[in-house]
Amino acid sequence: MAVEEKVDRRIQRTRQLLRDALMALIIERGYENISIQDITDKANVSRTTFYLHYRDKEELLLTSLIEMYNELVARLQPLSREELEREGITPRLLAPDDFEHVAAHADFYRAMFSSKGSAVFVERVLQYLEAQLQEGFVKPLEPSDGNSRVPSGFIASFMAGAEIGVMRWWLENDLPYSPQEMAKMMFYLCTFGSMWALRLNLTPPDEIT
């Protein structure tokens, strides 16, 4: 058992070294300008070791991101429709974890959202966000008869796209608001809409016509 734990810690350490090396190099040179040799040199591991863990740099990037995002998702507490209707907007709905993560890795995300980044990266982040939002947020809040005004997949896609767009704006403007402020604005805008944000007093229709 002790031997297995030691091996597992070694694997985790190697993967962390490769992840850190990749992220540092993306900031320095941009994603497309990095080779596997650059990554292994930076991490001080052999190419053979790299290929024991990852097929290529794209797999390293995407696997690393999913691992980080899964850690964030694991902190979230599920919320039911009944709880929301009973308790209203509670602090856990305004958790700034996503924005704190992006702020902690601001230079990396600036590079990946720029021309130095990767279109595959943006697409995979969108797909991940859509899936998590639909399963972990939208579906639990659907009416019991499933009769939402807009399909759940549509809502999840809208929210995921909005989050990516807001993150880019935040980074491009040098993080003018705190993660807590960003989380609140993002939640209120997605919840109440742009007409509310612009202080327009419009009454929404009961159904889409």
Image (tube, rainbow, N blue to C red):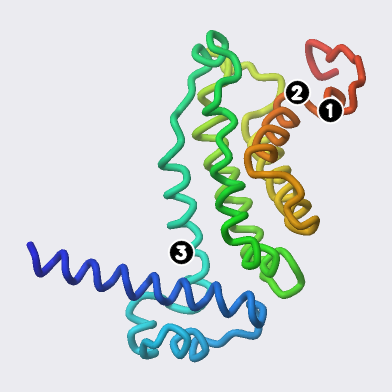
Q: Which residue is mark 1?
A: 197
Q: Residue at x 79, y 27 (%)?
A: 193
Q: Quick one: SS at disc 1?
A: helix
Q: Which residue is mark 2?
A: 192
Relative to 60, does residue 155 appear above or below in the rendering? above
Residue 63 has which mark? Answer: 3
Comes first in the chain, label 3 or label 2: 3
Residue 72: x, y in percent? 47, 46
Q: Residues within 10 Å of mark 2 (few under 14, many from 20)?
A: few
Quadrant where the C terminus is found in the figure: top right
Residue 72 has which mark? Answer: none
Image position of 45 (left or right of 174):
left
Q: Residue at x 39, y 88 (%)?
A: 44
Spatial separation of the CA atoms under disc 1 and disc 2: 8 Å
Residue 76: x, y in percent? 46, 36
Mark 3 and 2 residues: CB-CB less than 8 Å, in contact?
Answer: no
Image position of 188 (left or right of 125):
right
Image position of 189 (left or right of 204):
left
Residue 162: x, y in percent? 73, 43
Q: Amino acid at mark 3?
A: Thr
Quadrant where the N terminus is found in the figure: bottom left
Mark 1 and 2 residues: CB-CB less than 8 Å, in contact?
Answer: yes
In the image, which is nearer the foreground, mark 3 or mark 1?
1
Q: Quadrant of residue 180?
A: top right
Q: Residue at x 46, y 90 (%)?
A: 41
Spatial separation of the CA atoms under disc 3 and disc 1: 37 Å
Q: Quick one: SS at disc 3?
A: helix
